[in-house]
Amino acid sequence: DVKVTQSSRYLVKRTGEKVFLECVQDMDHENMFWYRQDPGLGLRLIYFSYDVKMKEKGDIPEGYSVSREKKERFSLILESASTNQTSMYLCASSSGATKGSPLHFGNGTRLTVT
Amino acid sequence: GESVGLHLPTLSVQEGDNSIINCAYSNSASDYFIWYKQESGKGPQFIIDIRSNMDKRQGQRVTVLLNKTVKHLSLQIAATQPGDSAVYFCAEADSWGKLQFGAGTQVVVTP
């Protein structure tokens, strides 16, 4: 089974702090994604990556950046956390072609910014 | 813009009955669709997928139906069990292969 591991289940940070969310997958997947999930809004794509050192903006990239230095690891960075970034963050990975591959998700990191 | 949506935010189903969860999509160019299940405290879990060259696909106790004419997707769960209580999401792949998710339907299984 694919395993996508997010380093923290819960995080509490202060406004203005720099926040790192880490994600590791163990199936040698090329594609990795970061979503945020908010009540009533479903999953919204923040950033994704199709290969090492490659990144693409998703639908809501403002206030975020990402890093993919190794194939198995995809990091989401909040340069200066704000209260409107309080959310559930989900990392996902998928294999092969950019189209037609199901995403495998981690269990999420619930971030609270105070 | 294009969107994926669900008709009902909450579906209450009696244990043992069949469940039907509906999803409307508006991007006629989408050719890949997925259903996910998300239990409380967990990430979404892949259930079943379907490509646009099919109109039906079956898995274990689940069936996905695709009606391209009316841009409608449904997930049927046979003999619903308490463990089926969760939020269910449909998603479609856009022209770049990125998934667009609907807001989700909460399924509540009652005894």
Image: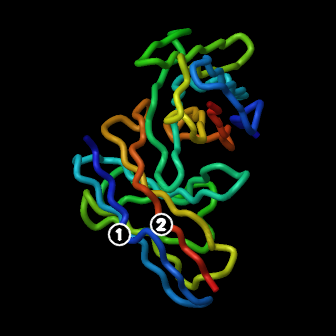
Residue found at x 59% / y 82%: A81
Q: Is residue B78 above or below residue B27?
A: above
- State the residue in front, A76 or A26: A26
Is B93 rendered above or below residue A9? above
User: Which image quarter holds the C terminus of chain A?
Assistant: bottom right
Q: For the N terminus of chain A, give its image quadrant.
A: top left
Q: Badge 1, how many Cα within 10 Å: few under 14, some, many 20+?
A: some
Mark count: 2
Q: Are marks 1 and 2 in contact (CB under 8 Å)?
A: yes
Residue A109 is marked as 2
Q: Position of residue A49 (x, y in %)?
A: 40, 55
Residue B103 occupies which quadrant of the picture?
Answer: top right
Identity of the amino acid at label 1? Ser
Q: Is residue A20 above or below residue B26?
A: below
Coordinates of residue A104 in the picture (x, y in percent): 39, 44
Please report, as a chain letter, where disc 2 is located.
Answer: A
Three-letter residue code for mark 2 = Thr
Q: Is residue A41 left or right of residue A14?
A: right
Left or right relative to A102: residue B77 = right
- What residue is rendered at 30% in x and 61% in y? A24
* Chain where mark 1 sits: A
SS type, badge 2: strand
Residue drawn at x 46%, y 60% is A108
Residue that sits furthest to the front in the current view? B111
Q: Foreground residue, B43 or A28?
A: B43
Seen from the viewer's position, the closer of residues A31 and A5 is A5
Which residue is identified by label 1?
Answer: A7
